[in-house]
Amino acid sequence: MAVLTNALPSVESYVNFFLRQPLPVLRRTVDAFEHLAKNIDDITRREIASTVQADPLMTMRLISHIEKHREDTQNHDIVTVGNAITMMGIMPFFRAFGEMTTAEDALASRPKALAGLLRVVGRACKASRYARDWAIIRRDLDVNEITVAALLHEAAEMMCWINAPDLIQRVFDMQRADRELRSSAAQREVFGITARELEFGLIRALHLPKLLVSLLDESQSKHPRVRTITLANDLARHVARGWDNEALPRDVSRIHALLRIPPEVLLRHIDAPEEAWPRLLPTDCRGA
């Protein structure tokens, strides 16, 4: 697998380079599929979907595969993992995804890049759990769509750790050296583009459904579904830095405004430790 070591001139050039490389999945996903395939007559769609949704990379592969192979008679997008597996069928699913490279093998010689990728994967999975929980509270029409969109929100950073590890490491080194430096500024300094610009280029090139594209569009931030996904990913990113992160009170305030549930209930939903509660409850939440 080729690795990018120098910046490219445009979003399109990054997208073309990244998509020429095979997209690996987590080793645990490959192992789980091998186990499931041995009992193929007894497994359910739900078991497969659970394995897929535990891996944002595999989720990306599946949704993209469905869109690329959609039939002319298919007049609606397949946005959820369960529906994608139903559309394919269990046997064709295992035929299509029987041989996959693992991220652990692809990045075996770059342990820092692998660690970076696994951090983002863990963050994406946490964000998807937050978003699903909040979508249920909001009685969203389809919580599975929200779950998948939140899981893929960090797709660009994942692809960078896989295909441009030296460049993305430089971004993080710059931010460590300057705590005031915004992510987008560091990304533009190193890559010439931002992660958000790259993400939309990748989403379109991967033929992801229009609904997912709209749910990931932060310019539509007034829409409750988009806010759910954005806030879930913000919270997951900030929690990863510790419950004393200075951005968390603002996150809690925004989530409270979205969900309109008692603050203490909200803090339990996000698994905030009780010792952090006084600091996490800004004035506009107290006594709500």
Image (cartoon, grey):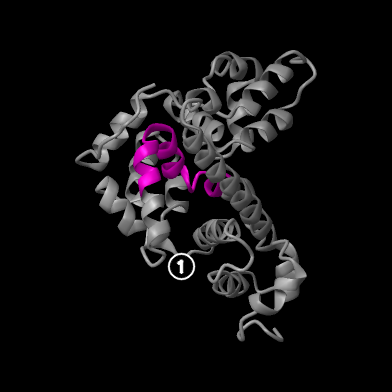
Residue at 60% in and 35% down: 55
Residue 38 position within the rendered picture, expressed as x and y whole percent measured from the top left: 74, 13
Q: Is residue 104 visible?
A: yes
Residue at 36% in and 50% down: 171
Q: Amino acid at mark 1?
A: Lys
* Residue 159 counted in the magenta span: yes
- Residue 39 in the image: above or below residue 235: above
Q: Which residue is mark 1?
A: 222
Residue 123 position within the rendered picture, expressed as x and y whole percent measured from the top left: 58, 49
Towards the viewer: 252 or 119: 119
Q: As drawn, which residue projects farthest toward the left?
A: 9
Mark 1 Cα within 10 Å, few/some/many (few <14, many 20+)? few
Q: Which residues are magenta?
A: 148-170
* Residue 137 counted in the magenta span: no
- Residue 98 in the image: above or below residue 213: above
Residue at 70% in and 72% down: 276
Towards the viewer: 63 or 210: 63
